[in-house]
Amino acid sequence: MSRYRVQYSPAAYEDLRAVYRYIALELQAEETAQHQTTRIRRAVRTLDRFPHRHPTVDWEPWMSMGVHKVPVDNYYVFYRVNEDRATVTVLRIFYAGRDIENII
């Protein structure tokens, strides 16, 4: 069984920080913010094995690029798998209630 190296894009890192800031500062729930970002990071870490187990998105241009999405609570983590380099790159992390197709 092969393992993949998991990495975050700069935008995904910023998205994760934004999730924390929103929950901790806007909702004034710092402990919840910590738990939520921890759950997201844990889900991302599991992508090192069988990253194709999650569905690909069904809209362009990401469908053509083979972008997958994994739900984590009220968020979606979007990522690509590069078989040649055995890497998984997390592209973005969005709140599931947003109009994601029109953001991308």
Image (spheres, helix red, strand yellow):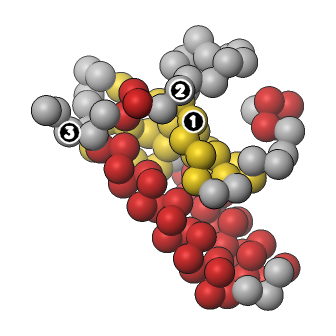
The tag on residue 69 is 1
- Quadrant assignment for the C terminus: top right
Graded by Cα atoms within 10 Å as few (under 14), some (14 to 19) or many (20 or more), the crowding at tag 2 reads: few
Seen as rendered, the residue at the extreme left is 1
User: Which residue is located at x 52 percent, y 60 percent?
Assistant: 40
Q: Amino acid type of disc 1?
A: Lys
User: Residue 7, how many percent across, how many down?
Assistant: 39, 48
Quarter holding residue 70:
top right
Q: Choose the circle earlier in sequence order: 1 or 2.
A: 2
Give the SS element for disc 2.
loop
The tag on residue 3 is 3
The tag on residue 55 is 2
Q: Choose the circle earlier in sequence order: 1 or 3.
A: 3
Query: What is the C-alpha distance between the residues marked 1 and 3?
Result: 19 Å
Comparing marks 3 and 2, which lies closer to the viewer?
A: 2
**For residue 90, above or below residue 32:** above
User: Which residue is located at x 84 percent, y 46 percent?
Assistant: 98
**For residue 8, above or below residue 25:** above
Graded by Cα atoms within 10 Å as few (under 14), some (14 to 19) or many (20 or more), the crowding at tag 1 reads: many
Relative side of 50 to 93, left or right: left
Give the SS element for disc 3.
loop
User: Which residue is located at x 70 percent, y 56 percent?
Assistant: 74
Give the SS element for disc 1.
strand
**For residue 12, above or below residue 60:** below
Query: What is the C-alpha distance between the residues marked 3 and 2?
Result: 19 Å
User: Which residue is located at x 75 percent, y 47 percent?
Assistant: 96
Q: Amino acid type of disc 2?
A: Pro
